[in-house]
């Protein structure tokens, strides 16, 4: 049976209280769950709760397994801060992970759900089929679906790959949908396997603690409800619920680094070295996450202790106060300041070089990225646009009586 036929069969269900589970021996199996969406600690929460209070019917899941699913998604929601929110925007690609995530949220979460799908206008029209699938699935489930169509190839920025452009356009659409719907969180479908794959990619490229975390379970308004679920667990949900999904065949092509790690490296490690490899990596990610949360709190406090407001600097620190921090603390502060200014992350070598320059003192200019320079004098360490630095130099040349350059323009560029 095609996904279109399955959705049409779901649409035709006369009883809205019944929830489609799966087909067994050619007949539809339904249930009325005792513990449904919107229940917190087995109690009712919110008007959107669908609990009927009837006996859990013998269909789809055992009561124990159903409770375990709810416990897992609830724990993620509470850790990430969205469990009590009035609603979520759900990124729905139509792939297995996003469909399973939407099912879990619809089943257990009591807030309003709005799906968002970006049609990349690629794969010879197959992306249009993905969009129609997302729309039909949401219509069958009574969920609003915001679909946006973008010619991603044509809208690439200079130097931007298709993958980078697609990600930028997707998250722009998610953010626009959240704003228009008045919702504070965007749920994306990264799972435990994605996290482990990212850890390994970061490790092979060279990384610090943040890279060993893999994928943060929350970043701003982006949350990851199924980060604790493996890909196999999500596929099992789809199969047990007889839910259709769209499969991108490129996900199994080993010409891509991530796919090769997924299809070849991890299976080899599990077979030859450690069958519990993925579980160990997930434990490492959780430990690193805890370390980073503590570390970030310290870094924020350190920056607030040195920050000062001296225009036209985008950010400025007191040079004298930096002497009290270790090189490790100073490097962490530099990385955080870069994040605040939305600058590219410096490599480890360049971070160490900038730290050494600050220790050397004197007067100098260091290019961070784009037209942003870090300028140092005894008065402060500032992040400035190059034009502001150069304009100060030009104005000094035009005014012979003004012999002293502003502090941010005194150093030579490095």
Image: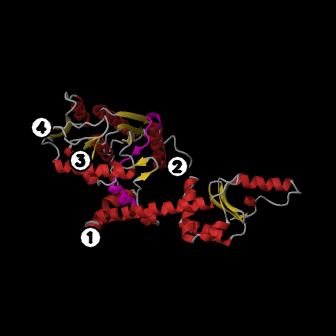
Q: Judge depth for marks 3 and 1 and give the one in front.
A: 3
Please state the extent of the stretch shown in magenta in the rendering: 179-198
Label 3 vs 1, first from the N-terminus: 3
Q: Residues within 10 Å of mark 3 (few under 14, many from 20)?
A: many
Q: Judge depth for marks 3 and 4 and give the one in front.
A: 3
Q: CA distance from mark 3 to mark 1?
A: 29 Å
Residue for badge 2: 160
Magenta region includes residue 381: no
**Which of 46 and 391 lies nearest the eye of the viewer?**
46
299 left or right, relative to 371: left
Q: Judge depth for marks 2 and 3 and give the one in front.
A: 3
Q: Badges 1 and 4: C-beta atoms under 8 Å apart?
A: no
Q: CA distance from mark 1 to mark 4?
A: 41 Å
- Say above or below: 384 vs 33: below
Residue 150 shows in the view: no
Task: Name the residue located 67 percent from the left edge and 72 percent from the top edge.
Answer: 360
Q: Which mark is residue 272?
A: 1
């Amino acid at each position: 049976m095609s996904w279109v036929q399955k959705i049409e069969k779901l649409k035709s269900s006369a009883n809205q209280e019944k929830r489609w589970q799966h087909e067994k021996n050619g007949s539809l199996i339904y249930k009325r769950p005792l513990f449904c969406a919107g229940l917190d600690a087995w109690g009712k929460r919110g008007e959107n709760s669908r609990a009927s209070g009837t006996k859990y019917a013998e269909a789809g899941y055992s009561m124990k397994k159903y409770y375990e699913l709810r416990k897992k998604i609830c724990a993620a929601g509470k850790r990430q801060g969205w469990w009590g929110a009035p609603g979520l925007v759900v990124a729905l690609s139509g792939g297995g992970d996003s469909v399973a995530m939407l099912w879990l949220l619809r089943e257990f979460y009591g807030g309003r759900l709005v799906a968002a799908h970006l049609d990349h206008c690629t794969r010879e029209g197959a992306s249009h089929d993905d969009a129609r699938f997302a729309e039909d699935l949401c219509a069958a489930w009574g969920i609003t679906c915001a679909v946006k169509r973008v010619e991603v190839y044509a809208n690439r920025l200079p130097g931007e790959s298709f993958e980078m452009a697609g990600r930028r356009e997707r998250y722009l659409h998610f953010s626009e949908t959240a704003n228009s719907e008045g919702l504070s969180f965007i749920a994306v479908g990264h799972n435990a396997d994605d996290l482990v794959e990212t850890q390994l990619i970061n490790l092979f490229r060279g990384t610090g603690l943040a890279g060993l975390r893999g994928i943060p379970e929350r970043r701003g308004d982006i949350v990851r409800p199924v980060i604790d679920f493996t890909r196999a667990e999500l596929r099992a949900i789809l199969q047990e619920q007889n839910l259709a999904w769209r499969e991108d065949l490129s996900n199994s092509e080993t010409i891509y680094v991530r796919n090769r790690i997924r299809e070849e490296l991890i299976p080899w490690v599990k077979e030859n070295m450690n069958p519990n490899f993925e579980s160990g990596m997930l434990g490492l990610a959780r430990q690193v996450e805890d370390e980073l949360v503590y570390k970030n709190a310290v870094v924020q406090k350190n920056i607030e202790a040195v920050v000062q407001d001296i225009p036209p600097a985008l950010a400025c620190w007191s040079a004298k106060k930096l002497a009290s921090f270790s090189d490790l603390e100073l490097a962490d502060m530099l990385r955080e300041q870069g994040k605040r200014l939305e600058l590219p992350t410096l490599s480890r070598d360049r971070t160490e070089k900038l730290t050494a320059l600050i220790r050397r003192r004197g007067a100098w200019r260091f290019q961070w990225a784009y037209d942003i320079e870090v300028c140092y004098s005894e008065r402060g360490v500032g992040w400035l646009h190059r034009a502001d630095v150069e304009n100060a130099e030009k104005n000094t040349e035009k005014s012979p009586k003004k012999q002293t350059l502003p502090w941010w323009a005194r150093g030579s560029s490095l």
